Amino acid sequence: MTIGKNVKQYRKLRKLTQVELAEKSNLSRSYLADLEGDRYNPSVETLTSIAKVLQVGVHVLLGEESNEAPLNDKEERDIAKKLEAMMDELESDTALSFHGEPLDDEEKELLRISLENTLRLSRQMAKKKYTPKKYR
């Protein structure tokens, strides 16, 4: 898929209008419409701004992961719940001990990011594996 089609796909997935996406990414609506229509090639700064609002990586908008299905809202909520449960369990007394030393805030955040990426990747892989081709 082209950059414009990817932007449009993820914009619709996030239930945003062109006006809303343009405002949140500091672009004009007409420029965004031209970008989605593949009449313009966006700069790296523009792509970064759009990707941040759409909560995807720039590489996704560039089409480097075009065969991956985006996660829907329910899947995002499921990931957030699982991640929260995992992080809460780390705070309990039965959690894995790291040589007797407690985790500081920076280490917890790094672990949270790693776990979230793992959950997202596993969900996308399962979705790709178990979704029939005609529904992709």
Image: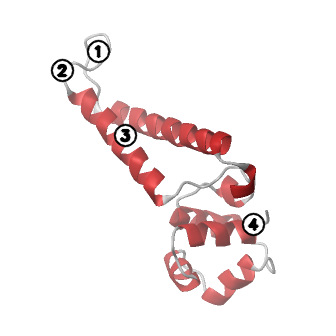
Q: Position of residue 41 (x, y in %)?
A: 78, 73
Query: Is residue 29 visible from the viewing direction of this image?
Result: yes
Determine whether, in the image, residue 69 is placed left or right of residue 103.
right
Point 20% across, 26% down: residue: 92
Secondary structure type for disc 2: loop
Q: What distance separates the C-alpha of mark 3 from that of mark 1?
A: 20 Å
- Three-letter code, disc 3: Lys
SS at badge 1: loop
Q: Which residue corresponds to mark 2?
A: 93
Give the x, y percent position of residue 5: 73, 70
Look at the picture and state if 113 lies above or below 134.
above
Nearer the observer: mark 4 or 3; the answer is 3
Residue at the top extreme? 99
Number of marks present in the image shown? 4
Pointer 3: what residue? 82
| Residue position for label 4 | 3
Regarding residue 136, the answer to whether it shows in the image is no
Q: Secondary structure at mark 3?
A: helix
